[in-house]
Image (cartoon, rainbow, N blue to C red):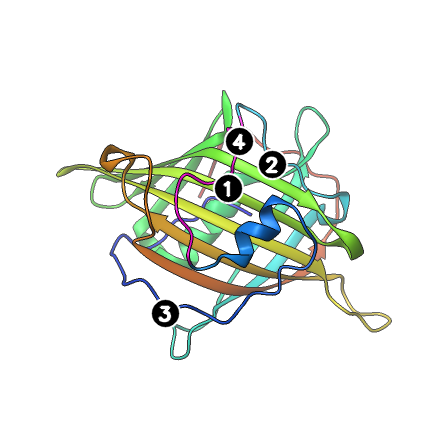
Amino acid sequence: MLLAIWPLGTAQVQPSETAVNSAGGGVLAERLAHWPDWSLPAPLPRPGRRDLVYPDSFEGSWEVRSEEMVPGSAAPLTYRVRFARNQRGELVGDRAFNAAQVGKALLGPQLLAVANDPANPNRQLASLRGELSLESTVVGRRSQAGPGGRFIADELALQVVHGPGGARISRVETLTRYEPAALSPGQPVRLHAMQWQATYPSPENGLAAVPLNTHSFNLDLQQVSTPPLTVPQGQAR
């Protein structure tokens, strides 16, 4: 869905969860069926400089409520995301805006700004207090549409934290499955999503890896506006 900016600490690998209903078929359904026993390399082709394209029904701005699926976890987060047309007319996530919204919800004033790389939609740079910056680049991606408006996407990002003490490198895989929510007449358009995320060590330790930690989330998205939007090339605060 977006490049996540998570707290910079580490966590333990969570216990295995019950089987996930992957519904549908293909490579991503098989990937999901193995959660949380993921490993790298993952079946995710390199994206080049093409962005993740979403179904037309995602266009506009959405209010998101995100809750981690672990008893006793932190309070749910709320933030906004938006999907807009790029120069090719494709519907994509506004990555700088979306990452800034998630980052503010997680880190508060520690996050200063998020900037897009104008030459590569898959690369963003977040500036943080304390002379820190987080460089995120999507290095693997696969997506597919399913029956009933379902959409599933998996991205692997290389994340580099730059700071006075040097660089810390990790890889973050995020698989998200969206589907339309059941609605009553007159209700706002909503989407329900489930998201699974695994953090792996630096590729300097070898391309093959198992997760350092895993997280899973319930996401509820409510559409708040549907004006025609275009993806800006600058930065978001």
Q: Are marks 4 and 2 in contact (CB under 8 Å)?
A: no
Say which of marks 3 and 1 sits in front: 3
Rendering quarter of residue 22:
bottom right
The CA distance from mark 1 to mark 2 is 9 Å
* Residue picked out by circle 2: 52
Q: Are marks 1 and 2 in contact (CB under 8 Å)?
A: yes
User: Can I make out residue 41 in this image?
Assistant: yes
Q: In the rendered image, which quarter contains the C terminus?
A: top left
The CA distance from mark 3 to mark 1 is 23 Å
Instruction: Tell which of 231 and 31 is nearer to you.
Output: 31
Q: Which range is magenta?
A: 37-47
| Dot 1 amino acid type | Glu
Estimate the x, y position of residue 171 in percent, counting from the top left: 35, 42
- Say the numbered circle drawn on residue 164: none
Secondary structure of the residue carrying tag 1 is strand
Say which of marks 1 and 2 sits in front: 1
Which comes before the other along the chain, label 1 or label 2? 2
Rendering quarter of residue 188:
bottom right
* Residue picked out by circle 3: 15
* Residue picked out by circle 1: 155
Q: Residues within 10 Å of mark 1 (few under 14, many from 20)?
A: many
- Say the numbered circle drawn on residue 45: 4
User: Can I make out residue 81 in this image?
Assistant: no
Q: Residues within 10 Å of mark 2 (few under 14, many from 20)?
A: many
The CA distance from mark 4 to mark 2 is 12 Å
| Residue located 43% across and 60% down the image | 36
The CA distance from mark 1 to mark 4 is 10 Å
> From what the image shows, is residue 105 above or below residue 130?
below
Q: Is residue 157 magenta?
A: no
